[in-house]
Image: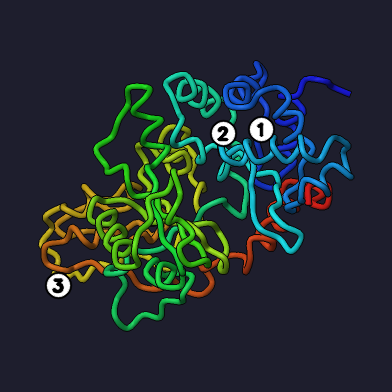
Amino acid sequence: MDSDPYKLLAERLDALPNGFPPTEDGAELRLLALIFAPEEAALAAQLRLTLETPAQIAARIGGDVATLRKQLKEMARRGLIAAGRTDEGLAYGLMPFAVGIYEMQVQTIDAEFARQFEDYYHKAFGQMLTITPQIHRVVPVEQSVRADMEVRPFESAAEIVAAAKAWGVLDCLCRKQQALIGQPCQHPVDVCMIFSDTPGAFDHSTTVRALTQEEAMATLRRAAEAGLVHSVSNNQRGLWYICNCCTCACGVLRGMVDLGLANVIARSAFVNQVAAEACIGCGACVAKCQFGALSVDGIAHVEAQRCVGCGVCTLACPVGALRMVRRPDAEILPPPETNHDWMVARAAARGLDLNVVL
């Protein structure tokens, strides 16, 4: 059995539905070595997705409970593993690399980590993006959907915000990472939104800035007005974040540009529609579309297969000639009901035994 703790951890992370593909030159191992000490990597490689208390982990893998508790608490504090309350007390578990460990490095990312991630991104990250069900899906900008269209709660960014009991915002790690390698973009950084079912969950956080519901809605509007695409985890229930993304920085969306991949994100159930009689052919919408789905030939035209249904372009139209309408039922692939359902489907697509990591 291989004794390299980083290789063991990399293999464990790749056994998760999200994936963490290996590279020929070990780029993924260098990335892990920047944030995990060897003993931390060895411990994380033995954790499960299901949260376990230190006593339960010790009973399964050996070790002193007090020592394990201290080590696990420190690792959770640094965003290396997950932590949460269970009936047995505070418990810990493995997180995917993305979405998970990578995003939790927003407070500590430096130029070296940014460079190492970029190296890994170009060598292997794209393999994670081409598997269905996709990691992320798009939800449309609220003002973009035609008034007579049904919008289900899991399809609405505003409904996702309204359903939460606590709200917070973080800096976008993707835009910070790109800035650190000398490729900054002009989109706002402080727009990564996070939610909880527990009131006041972020009030004492050192990494998340707590928001009121009204402030969360204002952040959502600010992101949309800046031309950012709302994306969430690809399931219907238990949604706990909204990424406000761009193709110039987002680790998922720029796969369409940098890596030439078409199917990196699950499109929304909506597609852009042009009111020909109202369109003045100004091209403002074309400039806003990050997916090349719009063109102007006298009036605007939509290439439905390229449109992801984000609705960002509608905010740019000076005459209100664009609105999102629901796609035909045959073109809509409903997202999995829960995150567990998503994991089951994703594991099956990758030929994995999910029970190994639960």
**Marks 3 and 2 close (CB-CB < 8 Å):** no
Residue 279 image label = none
Check if mark 1's residue and mark 2's residue have beta carbons within 8 Å: yes
Residue marked by disc 2: 125
Q: Residue at x 21, y 47 (%)?
A: 287
Q: Earlier in the sequence, mark 1 or mark 2?
A: 1
Is 135 situated left or right of 14 in this image?
left
Res. 334 in view: no
Q: Quadrant of residue 186?
A: top left
Residue pictured at 62% horizontal, 69% vertical: 337
Which quadrant would the N terminus be assigned to in this image?
top right
Identity of the amino acid at label 1?
Answer: Pro
Query: Residue at the spot x=82%, y=49% of the render?
Result: 353
Distance, label 3 to label 1, CA atoms, is: 50 Å
47 lies left or right of 201: right
User: Is the Cβ of the residue at disc 3 closer than 8 Å to that at disc 1?
Assistant: no
Please state which amino acid type lies under the numbered disc 2. Phe
Q: CA distance from mark 3 to mark 2?
A: 44 Å
Relative vertical location of residue 207 with respect to residue 137 in this rendering, above or below: above
Q: Which residue is mark 3?
A: 277
- Which of the pair 265/321 is nearer the observer? 265
Circle 1 crowding by C-alpha within 10 Å: few under 14, some 14–19, many from 20 = some
Q: Is residue 121 above or below residue 196?
A: above
State the image quarter where residue 43 is shown: top right
Residue 55 placed where, x, y %?
A: 82, 47
Nearest-to-viewer mark from 3 and 2? 2
In the image, 309 versus 344, the foreground residue is 344
In the rendered image, which residue does mark 1 sit on? 21
